[in-house]
Structure formats: structure tokens, C-alpha cells
């Protein structure tokens, strides 16, 4: 049986002020569209597919109430499609059931810092993935190494991903 898929045109929107989502660029997935992908499901789940001609995988749909979801469109996706908030984008999605694998180099470094590893293991898998995806999105080896070091530092100081990002942003 072929997995359900949906295709639609969406406008890239941006949260001005919305807690941890402030500044996010996103698209909306309406309740009836989400039900086509994963009937009866109201919690976050991962999708794969295309944004215009840009392939995506392991991207979370986040519930927003009333059965509606949003999908964050990160900087790498926006750059690839060449669009900013306000633009229209062609979307094709289906559920992504492939298990997410945390960056092996990051896990190896975590193993060398037991307090960081212990705190990392207390985080929900989706929050663990924030660290790994950020590391995987690095375009150069130097950036990847810097992000691993920043992540280990943050985790050893019991910072979640958002706290770690804000800490390092405020230091620069």
C-alpha cells in the first residue's frame, strides 16, 4: 500500500512573537490535510517530500490546536527554494516513518563527557534531534566541529537546545 500524500500551495509565514517560535518561518497544514497524512493523529510527526523542487526528509509537523499543524521552514530550506516569508511554495508531503539517526561524531564526543551524555539522554528524542540536525546542517567541517563543541558545552551545563543557542548568540 502506497503511503498517503498531500499536495498543495502554501504561503510562507513568519511568527512575529510566539514564545519559542518567535521569528520562525513556517507553512500551515490544515486539519483536513493532516488527517489525510496520518488519520486520527494530533501529536507531532515527521514528514518527507518536496518544497518546490527541494527534497525534504525528517521534518516535524508541530500541532497548533484544532487539528492544524505547522512545518518550520529553516534557513537551509529557504535558501534552497530561494524564497522568504510572504512567498508561495508548492508542497508535496507524506509521513516519514524512517527512524532518525543522531550524528555519530556527536554521539562519540558525548560519550567522552558523561554529565553531558546523561543530560542529553533525559531530553525527549525530538529535542535530542535538534542538536544533531543543527550539527548535520553545518556546511563546513570547521562549523560542524564548532557546533559539536557548543552542544557538548551546553549539555554539560544542562542547557536545552534553545538555551544553548541563546547562550552562544549572546556571547558573540
Image (spheres, helix red, strand yellow):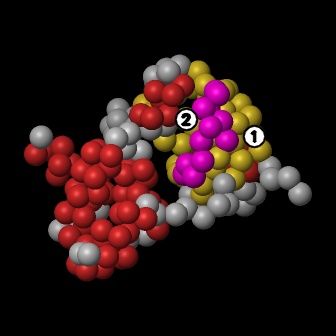
Residue 65 horizontal/vertical position (percent): 55, 51
Identify the image quadrant of residue 53. top right
Left of 35 or right of it: where is 144? left
Residue located 34% across and 41% down the image:
140
From where the camera sits, is residue 65 visible?
no
Q: Is residue 162 visible?
A: yes
Most distant residue in the right direction: 1
Image quarter where the C terminus lies is: top left
- Between residues 49 and 114, which one lies in front from this camera angle? 114
Q: Is the Cβ of the residue at disc 2 closer than 8 Å to that at disc 1? A: no
Residue 4 or 114: which is nearer the viewer?
Answer: 114
Q: Residues within 10 Å of mark 2 (few under 14, many from 20)?
A: many
Which element carries disc 2, helix, strand or loop? strand
- Locate the N terminus and report the quarter of the image it occupies: bottom right
Percent x, y of residue 17: 33, 37
Q: What is the C-alpha distance between the residues marked 2 and 1?
A: 14 Å
Residue at 24% x, 75% y is 113
Report which residue position mark 1 lands on: 6
Task: Tell me the element at label 1.
Answer: strand
Give the residue furthest to the front. Answer: 141
Q: Is residue 103 above or below residue 112?
A: above
Residue 157 location (% of width, % of height): 17, 68
Which mark identifies residue 151? none
Viewer-side residue, 163 vs 138: 138
Say left or right for 101 vs 32: left
Rendered residue at 71%/31% (across/down): 8
Q: Which mark is residue 27?
A: 2
Query: Is the stretch drawn in magenta largely helix, strand or loop?
Result: strand
Q: Residues within 10 Å of mark 1 (few under 14, many from 20)?
A: some
The magenta-colored residue range is 49-60
Kindly identify the residue that appears in the image at 50 percent across and 21 percent down: 82
Amino acid at each position: 500500500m502506497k503511503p498517503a500524500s498531500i499536495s498543495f500551495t502554501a504561503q510562507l509565514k513568519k511568527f512575529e512573537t510566539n514564545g519559542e517560535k518567535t521569528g520562525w518561518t513556517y507553512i500551515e497544514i490544515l486539519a483536513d490535510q493532516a488527517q489525510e497524512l496520518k488519520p486520527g493523529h494530533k501529536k507531532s510527526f515527521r514528514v518527507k517530500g518536496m518544497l518546490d523542487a527541494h527534497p525534504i526528509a525528517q521534518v516535524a509537523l508541530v500541532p497548533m490546536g484544532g487539528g492544524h499543524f505547522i512545518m518550520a521552514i529553516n534557513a537551509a530550506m529557504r535558501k534552497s527554494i530561494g524564497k522568504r516569508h510572504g512567498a508561495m511554495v508548492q508542497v508535496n508531503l507524506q509521513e516519514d516513518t524512517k527512524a532518525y539517526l543522531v550524528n555519530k561524531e556527536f554521539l562519540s564526543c558525548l560519550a567522552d563527557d558523561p554529565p553531558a551524555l546523561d543530560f542529553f539522554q533525559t531530553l525527549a528524542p525530538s529535542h535530542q534531534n535538534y542538536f544533531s540536525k543543527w550539527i548535520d546542517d553545518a556546511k563546513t567541517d570547521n562549523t560542524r566541529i564548532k557546533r559539536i563543541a557548543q552542544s557538548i558545552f551546553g549539555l554539560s551545563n544542562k542547557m536545552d537546545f534553545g538555551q544553548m543557542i541563546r547562550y552562544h548568540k549572546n556571547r558573540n
